[in-house]
Image: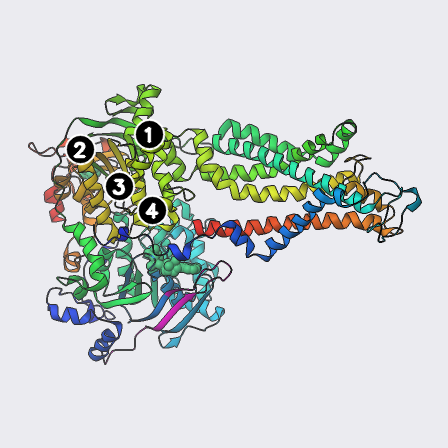
Amino acid sequence: MTAEPSAALPARAGDVRRDSLALRMLRDPMAVVGALLLALLVGLAVLGPWLWPYDHTTQRPEAMLAEPSAKHWLGTARLGEDVLAQCVRGLQKSLVIGVLVAVISTALATAVGLAAGYFGKRADRALMWGVDMLLILPSFLVVAVISPTLRDRSWLYMVLVIALFQWTLTARVIRARTLSLRGRQFVGAARYMGAGAGWIVRKHLVPHLVPLLVIDCTLHVSAAILSEAGLSYFGFGIQAPDVSLGSLVADGSGSALTYPWVFLAPVGFLVVTVTGVGLLGEALRRALDEGEAHAV
Amino acid sequence: MRSDAEQPDPEQPGAKQTSAQQPSTEQPGAAESDAVTTDAVRGVAAGSDAAEEPALLEVAGLSVTFTGDRRTRRPDLRAVREVNLTLRRGECLAMVGESGSGKSVTASALIGLVPGRAEVRGSVRLAGRELLGLDDREMSRVRGDRIGMVFQDPLAALLPVTSVGRQIAEAVRVHRRVSRAAALRRAVDLLDQVGIPDAARRARAFPYEFSGGMRQRVAIAVAIAGDPDLLIADEPTSALDTTVQAGVLNLLEALRKDRGCSLLLITHDLGVVARSCDRVAVMRDGRITEEGGVLPLLGAAVPAGHLGELLAATRDEERAAPAAPSAAGAPVLRVAGLRRHYRARQRLGRAAPPVRAVDGVSFTVLAGQSLALLGESGCGKTTTLHEILRLAAPQSGRIDVLGHDLSRLTPRDRRELRRQVQVVFQDPAASLDPRMRVGDIIAEPLDIQRASAAHRATRVEELLTMVELPPGTERLRPGLLSGGQRQRVAIARALATKPRLVLLDEPVSALDASLRVGMMRLLDNLRATMGLSYLLVSHDIQLVRRSADQVAVLYLGKVVEHGPAWSVLENPQHPYTRALVDASPTTDPARERSRERVVLLGDPHATPGVGCAFRPRCPLFPVSDEATRGSCVTSEPELRQTHPEKRQFAACHSRQLKTIIDAY
Ligand SMILES: Nc1ncnc2c1ncn2[C@@H]1O[C@H](COP(=O)(O)OP(=O)(O)OP(=O)(O)O)[C@@H](O)[C@H]1O
Ligand code: SF4
Ligand SMILES: [Mg+2]
């Protein structure tokens, strides 16, 4: 051969090597704080009921609206329920709802966005019309209208309703990304090798969308938690005797000035949860972007 | 464009004696002493030009370091290291080097536009005034008034929604306090100077209405609007076709002579340097390794140093014997009367005529042979490839691959043909999935065909050896490989299923010149050892000459000449082929400056509709006799055998090509 350095592997390999995602995240204080916060909250939500003597339904009429004390760290509510126990229960519910909504809406968005972007033409027009309709519909109003019929059913229906209004924007982004990926030459090359749509989606499109999906999924968690809180605040969400952080905030808001702990405790949990998820999502985005920049 | 640029003009007041017109009088000894370090060259220059006015541009110890990022552990990158340069008035200095050697960063440092976070040290003096350390406002004045810039991609440099006249007028008004109307008049004037025909009308057009070459002319008009002393052109012709490239280079040369401004020309094309520059500086890893006069350096019998390496690669290709005819077998691919028209977008409700991307193309590739499709961009080469690769019925015409008519394929045949027909694209960076590992990329065709895991593993290993990549490469991602290595991966992938026909779409044009020869040699060897047939798409004459058996020259979707490659390229019978051959630069400065060329004028995509499609640009048409001209206008020429004994065909009405072109 001529002078071409094909006999040697690139010397650059050392300096351009991509660190693993985990390593990059560990170096980012934002990621570390977010992850710690979330770990703490999830731990609390899972283990709380075993660590704390009170259940969220236990009522102690002898201690109604008691101030925070050694016995009740965050005080008690109107009927003598322990606020910390309620918050733990609410946190559980909110986290579960957040994760479920995120998974469902990301999956739906991926399927629709990929199909619209990859197959184009008719499929694209039909699917995007649907997405546009959902985007135009005032989601809160729709939920308010249908919530009476959901009132007596499982809270899972509410998960579906929130997911229904959350996936659309992501679907558009995924469609746009798919469109541009589809035009890339390596996709054309695969097609000329005889690859079918399934192969191309699995091997060439999804791997490129993963960073986007991970980030969006995270952001969906906090968005869903906030949506649920909003709905519950107006009475459309979780119904008593069950509680979520949102319904707790709603219940406590009346006595926010007189018995502030009833209100501030769930608000605090809500803020910390959403912040933790947000920090993690943002850090993920940064770490993945960096990886992307190296992978060009 | 301008014919006056063709003739060497000895009467240039500003022109330096170094641009000597007598090439071979230099003794080799003198040439060698010239080809040393910058300092020595400056010593020589100072000695001989003592009475000379001070240099226009003096760069001393220029260094650019891109600051790293601690968080991502990216180290500092010293892109430019201690560069010294001098450029006299009216002189043209070429800066050559491989991609990534720091040419562009040097240029951007000169004009104070280094991208990103970088530390710039040293000194840049323009007519005695220090430029480094000027504040943004002063610097932008210098950029407009004293230094004009021309970039590789003219479209990126022009605003899409403003008419070109307005853009040039804006540039004029930045430098001079004149009224809007006066600026517009001056813009038209400038357009005229850069060779845009019908400038007053074209000034109202938008950049997208212009062809690549014309856009570059507009960008040049913007650059010279402020009447700069120094023009910096960074790869001004790399994005253009060779035929158009010649026109733009002529223009730059003419401007330099007419206005006496200096030119710093950044390029990787040594042919361009040989043709129009006085001095050349060679860059490598951010340093200038050699500097000196073009004639002694490039004209030396055995060029030394890094320049020698760069030259050797290109010269090797130039001097390579034409491909020995390969033993031919049965037809592997037969294309007959292939047409592919695209519906054009409607304009103002009126249906525009369809774009005839491919308009009746026929050729045959025989087993073991290599056929080249040659032509400018937009002539339908790639469309032809894609029509074959689709393995589906063409819009019109007929394609037979390995004896199967594509319009009557059973799904099973099609699957089988997918194995037998493979493709290598131009740019491996685009055709390889950056997220996959090399091993998976190479094995992808096998995976799609569901090959067994054992077969897959051994095959990947075999293929890596075949394309001369070291073992272990399969674990890397393409981003870590060099351009040449990536293209080897793409070749390995194409060979994975043991195909019989490989389509090569400009397989080396995205690579550095020094890598091209090696890559072509590899492809030639593979063809011989594996009994492959190639359909090679290229605009590069040298490459076609060295590795194609047959060539078909395409112009606007039609074959205008075809035959054995050596015979077509040695003795072109169609004026278009002749122009292509002429436009292809060589690196011999003496020859490059003395030879005559047929230069094509006009827009490569203009077609008259009836008669010969090449007529608007044909240099032969205006000088032909009455009868021939009549045929050119009314009837489309058919391919005709040009010589009773040769298998060379050309589609031209004129029978006097040879005599007329020689007199031209
Ligand atoms: N903004 C930037 N930040 C960091 N590094 C950069 C930046 N711009 C360029 N570089 C690096 O500087 C070096 C020189 O780049 P430059 O673009 O000057 O090369 P070149 O000789 O012009 O190559 P080509 O022929 O491909 O244009 C390269 O290693 C490049 O990666
Ligand atoms: S047919 Fe006429 S116009 Fe066409 S190439 Fe020949 S001489 Fe030129
Ligand atoms: Mg460059």
As drawn, B642 above or below B273: above
Q: Which of the two discs, 3 and 2, sits closer to the camera?
A: 2
* Residue B329 in sight from this viewpoint: yes
Q: Which of the two discs, 4 and 3, sits closer to the camera?
A: 4
* Residue B629 in sight from this viewpoint: no
* Category of crowding for the residue at label 4, using alpha-carbon neighbours closer than 10 angstroms: few (below 14), some (14–19), many (at least 20): many
* Category of crowding for the residue at label 3, using alpha-carbon neighbours closer than 10 angstroms: few (below 14), some (14–19), many (at least 20): some
Q: Which residues are magenta?
A: B51-79
Decide if ligand 2 comes within 8 Å of the CB at mark 2: no
Name which of mark 4 and mark 3 comes first in the sequence.
Answer: 4
Q: How is the image coloured?
A: rainbow
Name which of mark 1 and mark 4 comes first in the sequence.
Answer: 1
For mark 3, name the chain.
Answer: B
Do the dots labelled 1 and 4 sit on one chain?
yes
* Category of crowding for the residue at label 2, using alpha-carbon neighbours closer than 10 angstroms: few (below 14), some (14–19), many (at least 20): many
Give amino acid for label 2: Gly
In the rendered structure, the answer to whether residue A154 lies left or right of residue B381 reads right
Do the dots labelled 4 and 3 sit on one chain?
yes
Pointer 1: what residue?
B340
Q: Name the residue located 12 percent from the left edge and 46 percent from the top edge.
A: B321
- Cα distance in 3D space between marks 2 and 4: 30 Å
Pointer 3: what residue?
B616
As drawn, B104 above or below B610: below
Pointer 2: what residue?
B368
